[in-house]
Image (tube, rainbow, N blue to C red):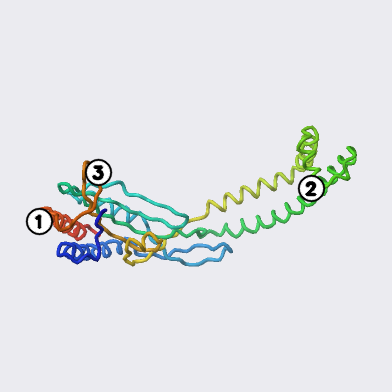
């Protein structure tokens, strides 16, 4: 079982680590707060109305983490990770250091939401109007097309003396009679293919929808709140830092750590690693 810092342990060593953690947490807050300063941008809503929204650039946080990875000399780091769950996103990096038969890891993260808008472009309104007009025309043609398809089906059923079948029986017959199914499908396709204007409208509408989709941009929203591990897992917005201390036995991280059995020498190195993290955070250029 690993020891997570911060915790509510009451031994002297844990109290020391919690105090060091508190200083690190506050310094991390000051650093990241500078990277997530919001800026206002003009965007368009789904109804094409123009509004202003705040956003920040997650790439600045990435660059901040990259600086940390270069300055944490006694720590190895994993790659900066990006996690997406629907509109909830997380940027995080994990640092690990070995101290004899102990492993100490340090997690830095930020959690935020990505919100879709249309970019500010007068073309949006024109596209939406044209799509609406095409939808109306397509709906009318579909109604006419459906009427013709029903007439074809009725004529074919009469020809085969199947008019008294209920709907389920008719479907079963069509399913089992491949010739009938193919014949009806061909006639229905002919109706569509003989109306090039309909096909042209469908393609135009699809092209406009794609163009509209390409005009979607994402704005990023977060909070300057400091999150605990549980708040992070619950999807709240904000920043998070925590440490995990684990013992290594037979090459694997496992077992329950008995803090009172950690030697004074190792405790000093662990405290020094915490102080190193705080010092690096203080020296990172903002």
Q: Which residue is mark 2?
A: 145
Is tag 1's residue or tag 3's residue first in the polypeptide sequence? 3
Label 1 with label 3: CB-CB less than 8 Å: no
Q: CA distance from mark 1 to mark 3?
A: 23 Å
Residue sitting at x 14%, y 55%:
261
Please state the horizontal and vertical placement of residue 174, each as a whole percent of the image.
78, 38
Q: How would you rate the neighbour count of disc 2 (Cα within 10 Å): few for under 14, some for 14-19, many for 20 or more? A: some
Verify CB contact (< 8 Å) between mark 1 and mark 2: no
In the picture, residue 108 is in which quadrant? Answer: bottom left
CA distance separating discs 1 and 2: 85 Å
Q: Secondary structure at mark 2?
A: helix
Where is mark 3, residue-wise? 252
Would residue 192 appear left or right of 88 to someone viewing this image?
right
- At 39% from the left and 52% from the top, the residue drawn is 83
Left or right relative to 265: residue 192: right
Quadrant for residue 28, please give it: bottom left
Give residue 232's position: percent from left, percent from top. Answer: 36, 60
The number of callouts visible is 3
Mark 1 or 2: in front is 1
Give SS at disc 1: helix
Q: On the image, which quarter does residue 133 sit in?
A: bottom right
Please give the name of the residue rendered at 21% of the width and 52% of the height, measured from the top-left corner.
104
Mark 1 sits on what residue?
264
């Amino acid at each position: 079982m690993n020891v997570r810092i911060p915790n509510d342990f009451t031994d002297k060593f844990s109290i020391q680590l919690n105090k060091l953690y508190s200083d690190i947490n506050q310094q991390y807050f000051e650093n990241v707060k500078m990277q997530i300063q919001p800026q206002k941008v003009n965007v368009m809503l789904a109804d094409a109305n123009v509004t202003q929204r705040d956003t920040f650039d997650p790439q600045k946080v990435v660059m901040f983490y990259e600086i940390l990875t270069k300055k944490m000399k006694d720590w190895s780091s994993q790659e900066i990770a990006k996690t997406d769950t629907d509109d909830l996103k997380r940027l995080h990096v994990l640092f690990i250091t070995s101290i004899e038969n102990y492993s100490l890891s340090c997690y830095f993260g930020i959690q935020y939401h990505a919100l879709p808008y249309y970019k500010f472009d007068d073309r949006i309104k024109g596209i939406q109007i044209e799509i609406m007009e095409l939808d109306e025309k397509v709906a009318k043609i579909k109604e006419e097309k459906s009427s013709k398809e029903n007439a074809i089906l009725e004529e074919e059923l009469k020809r085969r003396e199947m008019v008294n079948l209920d709907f389920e029986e008719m479907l079963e017959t069509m399913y089992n009679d491949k010739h009938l199914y193919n014949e009806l499908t061909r006639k229905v396709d002919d109706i569509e293919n003989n109306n090039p204007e309909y096909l042209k409208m469908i393609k135009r509408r699809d092209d406009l929808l794609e163009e509209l989709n390409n005009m979607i941009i994402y704005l990023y929203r977060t909070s300057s709140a400091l999150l605990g591990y549980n708040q992070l897992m619950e999807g709240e917005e904000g920043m998070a830092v925590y440490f995990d201390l684990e013992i290594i036995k037979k090459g694997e991280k496992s077992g329950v750590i008995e803090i009172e059995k950690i030697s004074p020498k190792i405790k000093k190195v662990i405290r020094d690693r915490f102080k190193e993290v705080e010092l690096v955070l203080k020296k990172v250029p903002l």
